[in-house]
Amino acid sequence: MNKNKLIIIMAAFSVSAIAEQEEYKPILKIEEVVVTAQRRSQDVRDVPIAITVLAGADMRDKAISDLTDMAHLLPNVSINTDYNAVYMRGIGTAELNVIGEQAVAYILDDVYVPRLDFLKPGFLDLAQVEVMKGPQGTLYGRNATGGVIKIEHGTPSQEWEGYLSAERGDRDLRSYEMALGGPISDNWSFRIAGRKSNDGGFVENTVTGENSREKDIEQARFSIRGDLSDKLTWFQI
């Protein structure tokens, strides 16, 4: 009889311990990543495309400010801004003349950009980058044989938000970036951003003593948004 009581007590203690462990077991939740690769907002897990998504805040934390730096985070992607060459999975072109057509499309805030030169100055107030690999001509036209690089910037909202970042590196590199946005009224909002970057370069001209690869970049961006009705929004950059 005592043996049976002991077995029952041990079994009850085991069940209680298991229940306690389950109660405090941490719940792992995968954060939803929303993309517009198929011209509508979707969870990236529901998009049947080989896609890499980079968040703007994460890129700023890693001091990634241009396409060349971004390429290090993208598998099967090669970017050389000196020769205007972008390749995805071995497919791409080098823009060696003004009339050449590229095989990778660049989409800047849902607007097609015909040349890589428009993206060379670097990123300012970046919200998200979507890199789609493989032919995307059905949605993005004939110049998307290799893939698409889709860049989205920060947009005005009815909540105050902003950031300030500074970067210092070798070759006398200094970079400062800021953004601020918020409501103007119940229906109107704004966002302003700016960036100043100076890189001393790494090639010295022995005749003049100057650095021939020195970069001095200044960027500014202002956008305003008005929600005129439930179905009509006015947005201008």
Image (cartoon, rainbow, N blue to C red):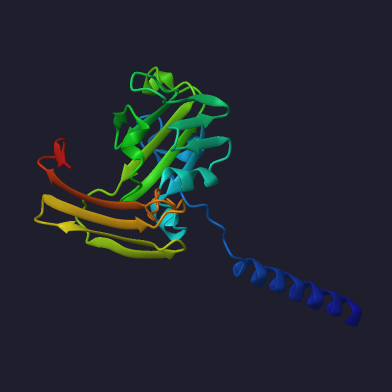
Question: In the image, 16: left or right of 111?
Answer: right
- Nearer to the camera, 29 or 75: 75
Q: Position of residue 108 (x, y in %)?
A: 31, 36
Rendered location of residue 54, percent (x, y): 45, 47
Residue 68 drawn above or below residue 157: above
- Residue 18's place in the image compared with 1, above or below, is above
* Horizontal and vertical percent position of residue 187: 11, 49
Judging depth in this view, the residue of 16 and 146 nearest the camera is: 146
Quadrant that contains the C terminus: top left
Q: Residue at x 37, y 54 (%)?
A: 210
Closer to the camera in the image, 55 or 1: 55
Q: Nearer the viewer, residue 101 or 27?
A: 101
**Residue 33 as seen in the image, left or right of residue 220:** right
Asked whether the viewer can see residue 231, the reply is yes
Q: Is residue 48 visible?
A: no
Q: Is residue 222 left or right of residue 125?
A: left
